[in-house]
Structures are given as structure tokens and as C-alpha cells.
Amino acid sequence: MTTTYTITLKNCAFFARHGLHDAEEFLGQRFFVDAELDVRPSQPLSDDAIESTVDYGVAFQEIEKIVTGQRRYLIEALAQEIASVLCARFPQIFRARITVRKPNAPVPGVLDYVQVTIDHVV
């Protein structure tokens, strides 16, 4: 029998400078990330060993490095990079569903946020 489970990091908040417009790079804004990580442990969970699973503290740090790092024009590209890096860093992840929210998107209207969700399956 194979055990799988999902680790969720919800509403991780970062200040960054992503977007197409020069003002977005100059001013920056908050971005929010949700990461749903489907995991197959490398050892039985009864071993109670962090090495068999995804250390979500390290996963958060990886997300932070990406979001606060190189500017991306598209939040789609940002979400894809997060998923790819997490899956490479943790081979136990077989699916990463990453959502990036941008609350201050430069659109000519009123909205709560723009968000994109990608599914990365290994």
C-alpha cells in the first residue's frame, strides 16, 4: 500500500517587484503564494523522520528566495518556477499546485486580486 498526503502552505506573503509595467518594478507590492504539495514519503511515516518528507520550513524559504529574487513579468512564470524548484529540491513531491495572488494588479477596475494557479506533475 502506498501512502500519499498533501502539505499546504497557505497565504505566504512577500514583497517583490514582478509585473510588466515599470511602475511595478519601481514601487513593488505584496504577493501571496499558496503551495499544495502532494507527497509520497521516501520512508514509512511510522519512522517519524523529517528526511522522509518535505520540510515545510525549507519549502517556505525556497518560495521566499524565488518570489523576492529575479523579477518576472508574468505571475504564471513565477508560479512555474516555484513548482519546478520545489519538485527538484524534494523528490518526494509528485505534484505541486502553486497559486500566486497579486492584489494590486494594474487593471482599470476594482477587484480583490488577480491570481494564477498551475499544476506541476512529476
Image: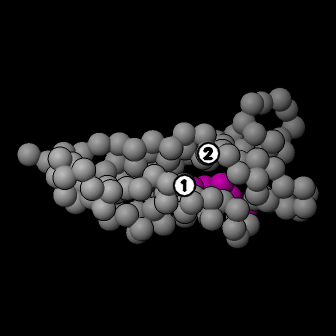
Between residue 109 and residue 30, name the one nearer to us.
30
Which element is circle 2 on?
Answer: strand
At mark 1, the secondary structure is helix
Instruction: Kindly identify which residue carries mark 1.
Output: 60
What residue is rendered at 72% in x and 36% in y?
Answer: 113
As drawn, the label of residue 2 is none
Q: Is residue 26 left or right of residue 58?
A: right
Give the label on residue 12, or none: 2
Which residue is more in the foreground, 95 or 4?
4
Q: Is residue 64 above or below residue 112?
A: below
- Near mark 1 (Cα within 10 A), the count class, few <14, some 14-19 or many ≥20, is some
- Local packing at callout 2 (Cα closer than 10 Å; few below 14, some 14-19, many 20+) is some
**Image height of 16 relative to 46, above or below:** below
Mark toward the start of the polypeptide (2 vs 1):
2
Q: Is residue 74 above or below residue 2?
A: below
Magenta residues, start to end: 73-79
67 or 115, nearer to the observer: 67
Residue 32 drawn in magenta = no
Of all residues shown, which one is farthest toward the left? 1
**Residue 87 location (% of width, % of height):** 40, 63
Quadrant (top left/top right/bottom left/bottom right) for the C terminus: bottom left
Q: Is residue 97 above or below residue 121?
A: above
Q: Is residue 94 visible?
A: no
- Residue drawn at 45 percent across, 42 percent down: 8
Please count the marks in the image.
2
Q: Amino acid at mark 1?
A: Phe
Q: Residue visible at 24% across and 50% down?
A: 48
**Answer yes or no: do the residues labelled 2 and 1 have beta carbons within 8 Å?**
yes
